[in-house]
Image (cartoon, rainbow, N blue to C red):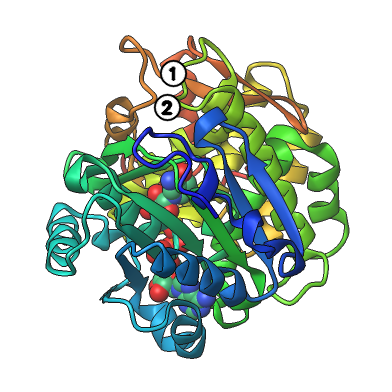
Amino acid sequence: MGFAGKGDGTRAGIDRPAEIGFKNLMSSVVEVGLGARSYPIHLLDEGSEGIRAEVARLREARRGCALLVDAGLAEAQGEFVERAFGDMPVLKLPGGEKTKSLEQLGRVWDFLAESGIDRQGRLFVAGGGVIGDLGGFAAASYLRGIDFYQVPTTLLSMVDSSVGGKTGINIAACKNLVGAFHQPRAVFIGTGLLATLPESEFHSGMGEVIKYGLLGDAKLFEQLRGGGPLSATSKELPEVIRRCCEIKAEIVRADEKEEAGSGGRALLNLGHTFAHAVEQAAGYGEYLHGEAVGLGLVMASALSRELGYLSETDVETIRETVRAYGLPVVLRSPVPTDALLAAMRRDKKVKEGRLRFVVLRRLGEAMTVDDVDETIVTALWRHYGGNNGESGKDFPG
Ligand SMILES: NC(=O)c1ccc[n+]([C@@H]2O[C@H](COP(=O)([O-])OP(=O)(O)OC[C@H]3O[C@@H](n4cnc5c(N)ncnc54)[C@H](O)[C@@H]3O)[C@@H](O)[C@H]2O)c1
C-alpha cells in the first residue's frame, strides 16, 4: 500500500479502501465521481466492519483519528460505536438543529486541537445530518481543512446530507447560512442502524426520499406511493437508499457547487424554499427538517399546478404520499404569512432579489424557475396555514 497522492491533494493510493480487499465486506458501493476528489459510498448492513478496516489502515499509516458522534446514537448504538471506532478521542454532541451553532462548532475545533489532530489527521463524523453538517464544517475549517468521513445514521443523512459535501451551521439570520463545500473521503452507511431510529425521524427522512422520486425517478415515486409505506425494517429499504444516493451522486457530479444557470444541483432543493421558511418562521425545532420538506413538497406541487405543469390529481397524489409517511401537509399551527415570506427572501436561493423555486414539470422531473409572481406564493402560504388572522387550515391542499 503506497502513499501516492500524499501532499499533492490527490486521492490515490492510501485513500482507496478497495486496495485492502474491502470488496468482500461490502454489499454495495456507489461512487461520487468528482475526479481527484471522488469517493465511495459504502452500503453495508451494519457498517462497523468497513469503518474498522479503514481505522486500522489509518493507524498503520500513523494518522491521528478523532470521532465526533451524535449523543443519541452513542446511547442507542453504543456497541456499534465501540466496535467501529475503537478507542480514538471522542466528542459527543446532541442531535437536533440547535447543535448546528457557532458555539458547538467552537467546541469541535477545540476538541480537534486537544486531540492533537494535525493536517494528516482524520475526523470521523457519526450521526444524523446535524452532526454531519457541523462536523463536516469543522473539518473544512480546522487547519484550513482536514479530511473527514461521513457515517450517517439517520435515514435523512443516509439518503441526502452525508453525500455531496455541503457542510455548515445556522446563524440567527438564517438556516445553513455559513458553511463550505468539503467532500468527505468516504461515506459508510449501515442500514441496520435504522432499527433504533425513532419513527418520527424515520418519517422525516422519508420526506427527502419522496423528494428524490419526485425530482428524478418516477418509478421510485410510484414504489413509495403504491407499495404501502416503507418502514425501517422493510426489505426494500436498502435498495431505496442506494437509489437516492445514486441520484444525488449523479446530480453532484454534474454540478458540484450549484453553479448551473438552471437545473443542476439546485433541483435537490425541491420543496426546500418552502421548508426552510417553515423551519425558520415557526422556530427551529418546531418541525423536523424532513417534516418541513414534506409540507414543502406539497406546496411545490401546488405551485407547479399554478404554473400549469401538474394536474390537480398529481397534487393530490403527492399530498397523499406525504401524508402516508406521517408528514404534515399543512402548517400544524398558524404562522404569520409575513414572517414566512421574509424568511424566504433571506434564503440562499434568492437570486438577484428574485425568489428561485424548483417546480415539477411532471412526476419524476423537476426544473428551476426564477420569475414566480409573489402574489401566487403569498396565496399558497395562506392556503397551507400561513395566517394574518385566519388559520387557512380548512383549505383542501
Ligand atoms: N448537507 C446537506 O446536503 C443536507 C441535506 C439535507 C439536510 N441537511 C441537514 O440535516 C439536518 C437534519 O438531519 P437529521 O434529520 O438526520 O437530524 P439529526 O441529526 O438531528 O438526527 C435526528 C435524531 O436522531 C438521533 N439518531 C441518529 N441516529 C440514530 C440511530 N441510528 N438510532 C437512534 N437515534 C439516532 C439523533 O440523536 C437525533 O436526536 C438539518 O440540519 C438539515 O439542514 C443537510
Distance, label 1 to label 2, CA atoms, is 5 Å
In depth, the one of 385 and 265 nearer the eye is 265
Q: Dot 2: few (<14), some (14–19), or many (≥20) neighbours within 10 Å?
A: some
Per the image, label 1 sits on a secondary structure element best described as: helix
In the image, residue 66 sits, relative to residue 259, either above or below, namely: below
From the image, tell me which residue sits under label 2: 378
Residue depicted at 36% across the width and 20% down the height: 350
Which image quadrant for residue 268?
Answer: top right
Which image quadrant for residue 45?
Answer: bottom right
Residue 353 locus on image (x, y percent): 31, 12
Say what amino acid the circle numbered 2 marks.
Answer: Thr
Residue farthest along the front direction in this orientation: 2
Residue 340 lies left or right of residue 331; in this view the side is left
Residue 215 locus on image (x, y percent): 68, 33
Say if residue 228 shows up in the picture.
yes
Say what amino acid the circle numbered 1 marks.
Answer: Thr
From the image, tell me which residue sits under label 1: 375
Residue depicted at 64% across the width and 76% down the height: 46
In depth, the one of 48 and 210 nearer the eye is 48
